[in-house]
Image (spheres, rainbow, N blue to C red):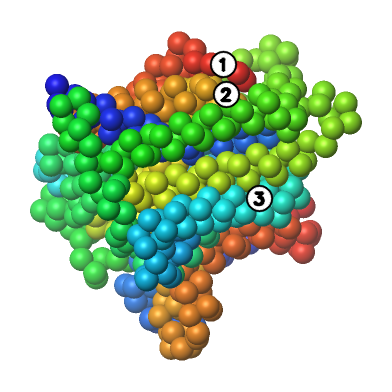
């Protein structure tokens, strides 16, 4: 896709998305309320956050070829460090974000340095183990900081006024949209930079990169830290949108969901990953609503039970995609619309 | 001293559960280079199958119900795993990441289904009278389930060793772990060994699911995943592909976890196990046994 045509598609789309909070249209069957209703804006904001998060995971998995099972840890770092600093220590939001930024650079640097001593599947297992340590830490509620299983509601007094209250959902929506744009811009810049090309070379053939005189370890660590840092940034926006931290985001299941998003959308394409994240979050939300409808509840148990479990449907969809549509939704669309993607 | 003995035996029993999961994982990885996330699903499905089978016969004597629960868990775990290998892993031959992804999808779907069918709350597991009483070991009363779990894992370990060292299939599996390409080049059908290793691993995981039900007194859909993560740690510390390495690592991890969770604070033991993993990786990236890189 050449730059002018891309801009021709993207700019109007972004203008429409940015103007959405001013539109009172309802789209029956797609969203429950009007487009500018807080509920719809919140859902869309979450979709953007997950699109951005899937994109950060695609950097490390799709581009550098590192099958990390610990990405939830870095997202959770953004969520929890900010939540604890604001709610427990009563820091201002910018100070809390500053602290989060430092932690989310140092943590992946240290853990990545250890994990990247392994390759392929052992690497996956080790990243999983570290993420589990993070999850245990959050659940154990050390010094009463994290709130354990109950999570941690974001304290209102230290928060800026624009981020509080249902009426201000539109501000958070814009922040989420801005996050997605920024993360996309950084990721797009990164994968087209010289180091980004080395990442893709490592994914294809690490030994060869080594023979060419480059040290794959440094490049992989770079990809790992960048992706983790951006994931923490999405975590901060998620925290604001949700108004609290939930230990669910620290679990291995959450990382697996990210994996599903990226594969759903198409591994190794930026917009595919965004699409996967947005579609996954939307489906996850809508399938819960769907399962409570009368049509589903009236079905016999054999059909009702599987259909009312979103994770079951998403898991099956995922298996089918891996087996039969290796490029994911993005790949399928690309084949259908060769003109736009070329 | 009594606390020490109790913690030691509880830790050994926990290690035994880890071993039952890790042994299959380690062999599957060693032979096929598949990171099997569905192992937690084999564990959970086996446990619920055994629990359902026991619940279906409320009139049978307790011991009989219990035995049937265990056998059902083993059979269902094994069959589920064999089907997984044939239907999902085999079509993705030579696509390692694809294989991992399929097991991830299966794990999500299977556990969600169990949760939908049985609810997410823990279900109580009845234990036969003889197992629910205690035994005096080292000056303390230990629930009989602990030695029972340990003994079961020991039996599985010995059976696995016998299988690997004394049978023809075992020979193929061991040779395949060392060098799969060479085994295939010699005209041996490794595919059947793949299915067999999956079935054995699944059976052991199913058994672990039911035994964990006795150990904790309850079964719940989420336990498989959390046990699986510690089993992964055991597999790496023990050296991928080595059954004996897994056994030793499982004991170390289980006992360490119990002692630190008791003498430190809850969660300290779990945390230390991950630290142990980091230390082992820094010193010796291939694990204790170092059977594979």
Q: Residue at the spot x=50%, y=49% of the render?
A: B206
Q: Which residue is mark 3?
A: B82
**Disc number lying in front (3 or 1):** 3
Numbered badge on residue B290:
1
Q: Position of residue A317 (x, y in %)?
A: 61, 63
Mark in front: 2 vs 1: 2
A218 left or right, relative to A70: right
Label 3 and label 1: CA atoms lie apart by 28 Å
Q: Residue at x 40, y 21 (%)?
A: B278
Of callouts 2 and 1, the N-terminal one: 2
* A130 to the left or right of A153: right
Residues at discs 2 and 1 in contact (Cβ within 8 Å): yes
Does A243 sit above or below residue A166?
A: above
Rate crowding at label 3 as few (under 14), some (14 to 19) or many (20 or more) other CA atoms within 10 Å: many
**SS class of the residue under badge 1?**
loop
Q: What residue is shown with label 2?
A: B242
Can you see residue A320? yes
Expressed as whole percent of the image width and height from the top left, the position of residue A234 reads 39, 47
Q: For the residues tagged 3 and 1, is the chain the same?
A: yes
Report the chain holding disc 2.
B
**Residue A200 percent location from the top left of the image:** 67, 32
Quarter location, residue A129: top left
The residue drawn where x is 23% and y is 37% is B135
Give the camera-side residue of A36 and B245. B245
Looking at the image, is A265 positioned above or below residue A15?
above
Q: Is A153 or B275 nearer to us in this picture?
A: B275
């Amino acid at each position: 896709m050449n730059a002018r045509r891309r801009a021709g598609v993207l700019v109007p789309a972004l203008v429409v998305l940015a103007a959405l909070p001013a539109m009172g249209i309802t789209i029956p069957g797609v969203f429950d309320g009007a487009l500018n209703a807080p509920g719809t804006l919140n859902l869309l904001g979450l979709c953007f956050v997950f699109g951005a998060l899937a994109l950060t995971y695609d950097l490390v998995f799709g581009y550098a070829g590192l099958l990390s099972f610990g990405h939830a840890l870095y997202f959770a770092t953004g969520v929890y460090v900010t939540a604890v600093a604001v709610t427990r220590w009563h820091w201002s939001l910018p100070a809390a974000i500053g602290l989060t930024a430092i932690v989310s650079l140092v943590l992946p640097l240290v853990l990545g340095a250890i994990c990247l001593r392994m390759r392929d599947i052992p690497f996956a297992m080790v990243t999983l183990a570290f993420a589990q340590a993070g999850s245990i830490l959050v659940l154990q509620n050390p010094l009463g900081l994290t709130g354990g299983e109950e999570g941690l509601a974001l304290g209102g007094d230290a928060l800026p006024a624009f981020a509080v209250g249902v009426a201000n959902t539109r501000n958070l929506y814009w922040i989420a949209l801005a996050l997605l744009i920024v993360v996309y811009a950084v990721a797009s810049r990164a994968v087209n930079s010289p180091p980004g090309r080395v990442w893709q070379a490592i994914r294809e053939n690490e030994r060869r990169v080594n023979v060419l005189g480059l040290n794959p370890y440094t490049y992989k660590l770079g990809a790992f830290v960048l992706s983790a840092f951006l994931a923490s940034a999405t975590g901060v926006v998620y925290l604001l949108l949700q108004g609290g931290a939930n230990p669910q985001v620290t679990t291995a299941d959450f990382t697996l969901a990210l994996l599903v998003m990226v594969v759903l959308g198409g591994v190794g394409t930026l917009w595919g990953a965004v699409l996967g994240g947005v579609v996954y979050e939307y489906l996850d939300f809508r399938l819960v609503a769907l399962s409570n409808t009368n049509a589903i509840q009236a079905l016999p148990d054999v059909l009702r039970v599987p259909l009312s479990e979103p994770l079951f449907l998403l898991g099956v969809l995922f298996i089918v995609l891996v087996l039969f549509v290796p490029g994911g939704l993005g790949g399928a669309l690309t084949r259908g619309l060769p003109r736009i993607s070329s | 001293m009594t606390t020490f003995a109790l913690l030691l035996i509880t830790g050994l029993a926990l290690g035994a559960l880890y071993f039952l999961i890790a042994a299959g994982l380690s062999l599957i990885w060693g032979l096929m280079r598949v990171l099997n996330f569905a192992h937690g699903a084999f564990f959970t499905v086996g446990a619920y199958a055994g629990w359902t089978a026991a619940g279906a016969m409320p009139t049978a004597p307790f011991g009989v119900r219990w035995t049937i629960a265990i056998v059902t868990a083993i059979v269902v775990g094994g069959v589920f795993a064999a089907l997984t290998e044939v239907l999902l892993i085999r079509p993705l031959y030579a696509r390692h990441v694809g294989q991992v992804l399929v097991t991830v999808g299966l794990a999500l779907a299977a556990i969600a289904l169990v949760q939908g069918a049985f609810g997410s709350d823990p279900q109580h597991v009845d234990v036969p009278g003889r197992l629910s009483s205690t035994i005096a070991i080292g000056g303390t009363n230990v629930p009989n389930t602990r030695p029972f779990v340990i003994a079961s894992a020991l039996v599985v370990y010995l059976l696995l060793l016998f299988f690997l060292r004394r049978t023809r299939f075992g020979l193929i599996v061991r040779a395949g772990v060392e060098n799969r390409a060479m085994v295939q080049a010699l005209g041996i059908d490794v595919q059947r060994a793949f299915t067999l290793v999956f079935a054995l691993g699944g059976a052991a995981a199913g058994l672990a699911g039911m035994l964990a039900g006795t150990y904790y007194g309850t079964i719940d859909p989420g336990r498989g995943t959390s046990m699986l993560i510690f089993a992964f740690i055991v597999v790496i510390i023990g050296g991928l592909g080595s059954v004996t390495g897994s056994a030793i690592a499982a004991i170390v991890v289980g006992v360490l976890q119990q002692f630190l969770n008791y003498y430190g604070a809850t969660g300290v033991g779990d945390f230390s196990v991950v630290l142990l993993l980091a230390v082992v990786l820094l010193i010796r990236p291939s694990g204790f046994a170092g059977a594979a890189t």
